[in-house]
């Protein structure tokens, strides 16, 4: 059921107390031709991460999926993931959390100067289209907001743990506003991402289906791919190719 959100979010919002996955519902709506709508839930019982991984999504979080129908090529889709992570990190920072972005789709809180971190939020972008044109893009954003660490995986943290509870309505509004600004000015995404990046400057290992690659993360391309300086020269890794990235 679409509900009146009560705040001036740049998207219509369909709210659910409990749902399987907001991404699944958003994909369904996208298939029906809907645009600029956000599906929001208090709890997900079938939350999904990347590569068939499960996403823990108890009551108290911010689980939201945005339906976009942008006039871009599929190669630009990763910019929407980066835009969502920037928007999430900004909203979390406004809430008092030391949020940084880990390529390709995580918002994390650093634990030390050695690159260790706990995960605060994750992004799952899914799309449909042809080789030259995106039909729709669903950007799913999961933020551990007002949740006890005990109810999350061991490697996770929450806004509650870091800075105390937030007004989730206000948080979602700020998040969606920031995302809307970034998606309507895609050239601003990579510079904004670089400002909040934890990954740039780190020595990292990226696991890929082909083979792992180790190098210094030196840049992000205009299309959001990560550039590594390796012993054998520069290697560019796309988000679709990245199974895991960890500092080494
Ligand atoms: C992600 O996947 O980080 C993308 C998560 C996207 C979730 C949102 S919620 C709204 C929308 N609806 C959905 O069904 N999904 C989206 P990935 O990079 O594959 O990370 C998944 C891994 O993170 C898991 O294998 C766990 O190790 C860990 N994890 C699971 N739940 C977590 C949580 N709540 N907080 C932090 N880490 C978590």
Image (cartoon, helix red, strand yellow):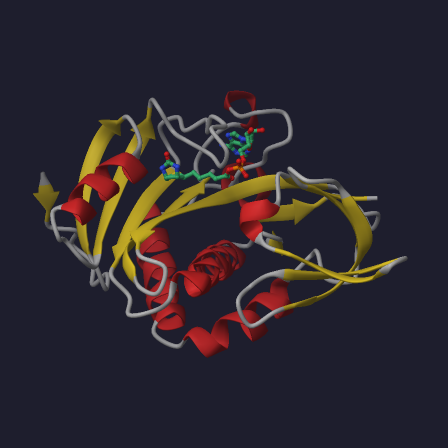
Name the residue: 73% across, 40% down. 211
Name the residue: 39% across, 60% down. 74
* Rendering coords of residue 169 (x, y %): 29, 49
Q: Along the line of sight, which residue is nearer the eye, 26 or 40?
A: 26
Name the residue: 35% across, 24% down. 46
Whether residue 76 is visible here, answered yes or no, is yes
* Rendering coords of residue 193 (x, y %): 57, 66
Q: Along the line of sight, which residue is nearer the eye, 210 or 85?
A: 210
Judge from the rendering whether residue 71 lies leftward or rightward of residue 118; answer left or right. left
Whether residue 105 is visible here, answered yes or no, is no
State the quadrant of the N terminus: top left
Judge from the rendering whether residue 30 lies leftward or rightward of residue 87; answer left or right. left
Please tell me in which quadrant of the rendered image residue 233 appears.
Answer: bottom right
State the quadrant of the C terminus: top right
Q: In this view, does 43 lie above or below 3?
A: above
Q: In this view, does 152 lie above or below 187?
A: above
* Rendering coords of residue 230 (x, y %): 84, 58
Please tell me in which quadrant of the rendered image residue 100 appears.
Answer: bottom right
* Rendering coords of residue 67 (x, y %): 25, 53
Outermost right residue: 231
């Amino acid at each position: 059921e679409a509900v009146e959100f009560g705040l001036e979010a740049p998207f219509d919002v369909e709210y659910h107390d409990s749902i399987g996955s907001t991404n699944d519902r958003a994909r369904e709506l996208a298939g029906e031709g809907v645009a600029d709508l956000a599906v929001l839930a208090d709890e997900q019982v079938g939350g999904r991460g990347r590569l068939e991984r499960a996403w823990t999504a108890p009551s108290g979080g911010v689980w939201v999926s945005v339906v976009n129908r942008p006039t871009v090529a599929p190669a630009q889709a990763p910019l929407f993931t980066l835009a969502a992570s920037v928007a999430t990190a900004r909203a979390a920072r406004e809430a008092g959390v030391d949020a940084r972005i880990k390529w390709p789709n995580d918002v994390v809180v650093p634990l030390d100067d050695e690159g260790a971190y706990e995960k605060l939020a994750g992004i799952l972008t899914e799309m449909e289209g042809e080789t030259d044109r995106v039909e729709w893009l669903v950007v799913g954003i999961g933020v551990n907001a007002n949740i006890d660490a005990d109810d999350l995986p061991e490697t996770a943290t929450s806004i509650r743990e870091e800075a105390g509870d937030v007004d989730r309505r206000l948080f979602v509004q700020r998040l969606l506003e920031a995302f809307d600004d970034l998606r309507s000015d895609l050239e601003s995404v990579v510079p904004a991402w670089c400002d909040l990046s934890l990954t740039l400057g780190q020595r990292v290992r990226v696991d890929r289906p082909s083979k792992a690659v180790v190098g210094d993360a030196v840049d992000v391309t205009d299309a959001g791919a990560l550039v590594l300086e390796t012993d054998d020269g520069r290697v560019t890794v796309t988000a679709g190719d990245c199974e895991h990235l960890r500092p080494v």
